[in-house]
Image (cartoon, rainbow, N blue to C red):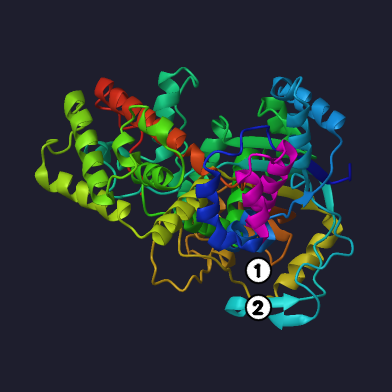
Amino acid sequence: MQSGMVLRVRKPSALREQAALEAAVWGPVLGESTSAASEALRTDGSSAAAIAAAAMCREQQYVQRVMAPLLGQQHVREARPVAAPPDYLERVLAANGLRSCCEGRPSRVAATAAAAALLLDVTLLPSCSSRTVYGSGSSMGPHGLARGGSTAVPEGCGPVVCLEVKPKSGFIGCCTTVHPDCRHIKRSRSRYQLHQMLKLSEGKIAARSSYDPCDLFSGQPARVRKALRALLAHPQNNLRLFVDGQPQQLSPAACSTAGQLCAEQQVQHSQRWDALAELLAAALEAEGVLRRLLHAQRQCEYDIEGIYRLYCSLAGLIADTGAEAAGGSPAAAVAAVGASPAAAAEAVVRDTTLQTSSAGSGGRGGPPLDDEARLEEHCAALRRLLTLPEAEAHAVLRSYVVSATAKDCAVMIALQRCQQQQQQQQQQQQQQQLPGSRGFPACGTCDDSSDGSSAIGATSYSATGTVSGDSNDGARSQLPSRAESIQPQVGAELGMLRLLPCGSCFRYRISFVDLDIKPLSKIPAHFALDQRIVAAARAHLQAQPGDCSAGRSQ
């Protein structure tokens, strides 16, 4: 195994489901390079290894052609397929609790071996002794940012602390394909907070987290830092810690180790986590990754309720839907072969209306269920969706997969202190740079008129969201720490931050991981989870009508 690399293997799974629909949806975007992959997935005689290799090929094309342009090429690491020995992979699967997946099934092991790839270990930072971060020569980049080929990121010292953040969905949708009975619930809180209610009811968590993705994506410094502090306090499975590439439990001992990142005399021990949250926020703001991620999450304008019906309709037209239509699900009428799209839309509305009426209002606090205007709006939205031309319908499914990937991916932020003797030189170089930032419109908004420019990276924010250039010097001096970006990031792999007031410099890198293409066949499972979340949230709010611990944050 190469140093600084990780081996990624795909879990053994059935890959043939809805292969024809997958090919029809992704063919126009991923191009001819995936035609062999699609053929392997459709052909009954294809080996498990060929199917796995085909899936890996399509996933690589998806990440590089679809996700990387949205999230920023410099933040997406390319995977390199490798031929992994089957016996080695068996040991890897066993070590990760997946022995039963391949035990006694050589074809599954071969399939997993064919789907292996090497990726850069983003929990570590590279040596920078001869690295230049802005390319060769000097030029002016976008937004008037200065580039200099002679500017190198200093070497690091001390541990490399990497935090893996799973932000989840950063906005609250207002789609009319959501049934009127569910709108009040879905529009009152973020999806993450609603999901917390389900996890609490199932006993998976002892208490609900105060983290709200809408805070993290708000574009408001104080709310961003509030979200990061909430994650540090209650990480659940949305925050993981790595120290020098090794995963660590977020225990007091690990917190002490991570706190060494900010272990300066000017940063008291009790304030180190606040300083770490400040560094994370400053890095995210300087790079504009949250704007990009939110933009990717907003690619689909439809809720899963409408996407599920559209998927069933298309699967019924392209693939064998006998099992789906006979299953008695609410989508049976939609998936039935021969039904016109308009009739299918009306059938869906009748089906969901009857189900909702029989369940009662559930104390949702909204208008009556027989509100004709809202039901007609819902019916019209479904009718428009289900009667889209096939090419447009395929584009909608693509946008859903992209959005689902962006909502489920992770952001890796690796930080390390720079060598002290080089910090002063680096700070002097800052004076010769023109500050600025790149990115999408402010997070939490959907302003299509914005030109995408921003000045967040040029501004130093305090831990409470006060701009460092504010005239309120007395209030600023009471804050434990704040961080600023030393250099503008224009396609750079590594960036630089300075923690104030101590002046320590840190190098960092931000990477996106878990950018897998979501199989269309998972859409029914996504819909089922959505319905469970809504039911749990309704029950929770019925039992605790005065619960104001979380509300609409956007």
Q: Secondary structure at mark 2?
A: loop
Residue 3 drawn at (x, y percent): 88, 45
Residue 519 in which image quadrant:
top right
* 152 relative position to 486: left or right: right
Viewer-side residue, 339 vs 178: 339
* 360 relative position to 348: left or right: left
Neighbour class for label 2 at 10 Å: few (<14), some, many (≥20)?
some
User: Which residue, as the protein is rendered here, is positioned at the far top?
Assistant: 203
What amino acid does circle 2 point to?
Gly
Residues under numbered marks 1 and 2 in contact, where contact means CB atoms less than 8 Å apart: yes
Query: What number of labels is visible?
Result: 2
- Is residue 512 visible in the rendered image? The answer is no
Neighbour class for label 1 at 10 Å: few (<14), some, many (≥20)?
many
Viewer-side residue, 241 vs 478: 241
Magenta highlight range? 33-61
- Above or below, 452 relative to 350: below
* 140 relative position to 234: left or right: right
* 293 relative position to 430: left or right: left
Badge number at residue 141: 2
Residue 222 drawn at (x, y percent): 47, 50
Instruction: Tell me how far mark 1 sits from mark 2, CA to CA.
Output: 10 Å
Q: Is residue 59 magenta?
A: yes
Q: Nearer the viewer, mark 1 or mark 2?
A: 2
Badge number at residue 488: 1
The residue that appears at 36% across and 50% down in the rendered structure is 302
If you read the primary sequence from the N terminus, does the residue marked by circle 1 or circle 2 appear first?
2
Residue 356 drawn at (x, y percent): 21, 30
